[in-house]
Image (cartoon, rainbow, N blue to C red):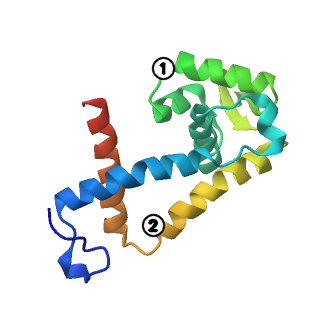
Amino acid sequence: MSTDNRHGDEAAGLGVEDGIRTLLLLMPRMVGRAKRIKIPPELESFSLAPRHLSLFAFLLFDGPMTVNALAARLEVAPATVSLMVGELSRQGILRREADESDRRRTIVSISDEHRPAIDGWLARGAGAWRRALEPLTPAQRRMFVDTLEAYEQGLDGT
């Protein structure tokens, strides 16, 4: 393996094996820290899980949307999202309203009452990503995101 160039000049770069070693050590620490982000007290009684964070993030960043649109973004079956939305709407975390342009469709959104707590819960992670991504060029950000997606796909064996 090559030497650790973490503190060297940019031209030195990082060898593949050193990158793998560094990331294999870094990823568990990142996941551990992310898991330690506390659920806001006002949401603790709702038995929320990591799968809910993704659903909340889409609704916060992209706004209200249909169950089918959420399912496509979450890459799960609409029935799965429908069950999650049903559970969360019964608890008052999400709102379901008929789509004015097509009354057969339901639009899902975060309830006004719980939006600040959910926004605060996601803000720490969003702030960390913002600090990490802002110094990069758009092309570097694209490469970083593509690399993480390739890693995720590699874990799935796809």
Q: Is residue 134 above or below residue 110?
A: below
Q: CA distance from mark 2 to mark 1?
A: 31 Å
In the rendered image, which residue does mark 1 sit on?
A: 77
User: In percent of the image, x 70 and y 47: which residue is there?
Assistant: 38
Q: Amino acid at mark 1?
A: Ala
- Quarter of the figure with the C terminus: top left
Q: Considering only vertical position in the picture, is 53 above or below 119?
A: above
Of discs 2 and 1, which sits in the foreground?
Answer: 2
**Which quadrant of the rendered structure holds the N terminus?**
bottom left
Q: Position of residue 25 (x, y in %)?
A: 37, 53
- Which residue: 77% across, 29% down? 46
Q: Quadrant of residue 49?
A: top right
Q: Going 25% across and 83% down the picture, which residue do you hit? A: 9
Q: Residues within 10 Å of mark 2 (few under 14, many from 20)?
A: some
Q: Residue furthest left?
A: 1
Quarter of the figure with residue 16:
bottom left
In terms of image quadrants, where is residue 13?
bottom left
Which percent across, then down, holds residue 83?
63, 17
- Residue 105 shows in this picture: no
Q: Relative to residue 28, is residue 86 drawn left or right? A: right
Q: Secondary structure at mark 2?
A: helix
Of 148 and 110, which appears nearest the observer? Answer: 148
Q: Amino acid at mark 2?
A: Leu
| Residue 15 place in picture, x, y as percent | 17, 64
Is 8 drawn above or below residue 151 in the view shown? below
Q: Is residue 28 above or below residue 17?
A: above
Residue on which the image places disc 2: 133
The front one of 121 and 17 is 17
Residue 28 in view (yes/no): yes
Secondary structure beneath disc 1?
Answer: loop
